[in-house]
Image (spheres, helix red, strand yellow):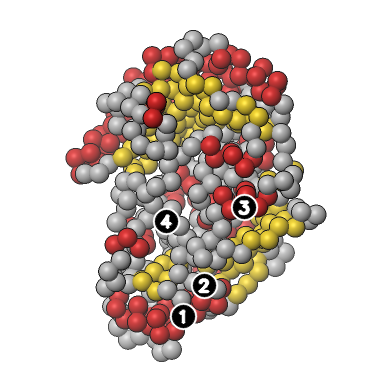
Amino acid sequence: MSVPTQTPTRTDVVTALRTALHCPVHGPQDPDWESVRRGWNLHVDQQPAAIVEPLTVTDVQEAVRVAAALEVPVTTQSNGHGATEAMTGTVMVRAHRLRDLSIDVQARRARVGAGVKWTHLVAALAGSGLTGTPGSTDDLTVVGYHTGGGLPWFGRAYGPAAQWVRAWQVVRADGSLAEVTAESDPDLFWALGGGGGGLGVITAVEIELLPAPPLVGGQLMWPAEHAAQVLAAFAEVTRAAPAELTLWLWLITFPPTEPFPPELHGRSMVNLNVTFLGAEAEAERLLAPLRAVPGLEVDTVAPLPVSELSSVANEPTDPLPVLDWSHFVAELSPDFRAGLLEVNPPHPDTPMIACIRHLGGALRAEVPTAVEPIEEEYLLFGFALAGSPAEEERVHEHWRVLEHRLGGHLSERTHLNMLGPDPDLTRALRPATLDRLRQVKATQDPQRVFRSHRPILP
């Protein structure tokens, strides 16, 4: 196919893809385009030139060759997560139909296609005695989660998810297919695990599985008036917590929608998510200072199958118009706790739901991938729904007030998977890591065939 002499129109792109491929190709002239192009975050108006839904890896290879000949960048978004405005004008590969999944129990390995969600892998592992390192929701694809490094529920004990990747199957810029390992291509292997993408289309990943230990998990909830006491106890418990214990604290007014139970609709609460890798008696001992806080209304902490892990956070999976905000935090000092509750109390008038995730443990360690070690002990993460420009401005003003009040308590950095629709990698990756990613990009994709939702800029 000859190199174009002028920039192709979106119609040109769709026509070329439909001529070359035998899988679904969607374009702006299609009657269902508005729904097809939609990402999970409805606040992001992503406008790709075309969307390809490959049925086979060969479809992916051909789509890359066509897009490269047209000089239209290729991006990936299997199930709608990771929407940013960087998707504009791209050929978007939605590989949600690539659902090959095989498990070798003896070797403790899983081979996972790009369209496989965590819910599929967790179900397939039931009864095997093995587990991966999933995050807060099982609605994410396993491949996409690992390219961002992965911030697992069990990260304090096992580190970031990307360090358990053993191979990537990747379509390169020339359309060829490669099996990338630490031995076959160490630089690309390093970059794919936590570099955020933009170096090829990953069609499958092979991960090492871990023995599944006994798991205790669930939720503890108090009415909003007990927020200061719960937050103080949370700081106390996490300060000395073993790596097997992970706690996330939410300041939330529950929306009047599913998946939240009707009895919580509209109520302002402090919600503690709990996972513990070990015996129930030890979990109870560690949680005792929190249980001593008066007013505890909800207590679902109990032995839990790994297959039900996503029920702990119970995050919504339907698309929403979301604004994201996050910073790492070194410690939960009295002044930090007071400032957070002054500006962001759990109350119907507070526009942001706030979550404090306890990090530390193995997440501090250097790993042989692009994932950054996290020096800070906590992540303060917030999200808000904004369906209009006025609501969006109210949320941004809230963030400004919160950042001013918390001041030096907040790091300028955050986790790559928590950047939301922000395409800027500099808040998540240090200059040395970005420099190495740029070098890998220049070697692997000098013509910049691929564009991540957070592009690796020259």
> How many residues crowd mark 1 within 10 Å: few (<14), some (14–19), many (20+)?
few
Callout 2 touching callout 1 (CB < 8 Å) = yes
Q: Name the secondary structure under disc 3.
A: helix
Q: Residue at x 40, y 85 (%)?
A: 19
Tell me the residue that label 2 is attached to: 55
Camera-side mark, 4 or 3: 3
Using residue 61 as the reference point, say whether residue 392 is left or right of it.
left
Q: Name the secondary structure under disc 2.
A: loop
* Quadrant of the image containing the C terminus: bottom left
Tell me the residue that label 1 is attached to: 22
Query: Which residue is nearer to you in this view: 137 or 158?
Result: 137
Tell me the residue that label 3 is attached to: 121
Residue 277: percent from the left, percent from the top?
68, 32
First in sequence: mark 4 or mark 1?
1
Q: Which mark is residue 245?
A: none
Callout 2 touching callout 3 (CB < 8 Å) = no
Q: CA distance from mark 2 to mark 4?
A: 18 Å
First in sequence: mark 2 or mark 4?
2
Residue 423: percent from the left, percent from the top?
39, 53
Kind of residue at badge 4: Gly
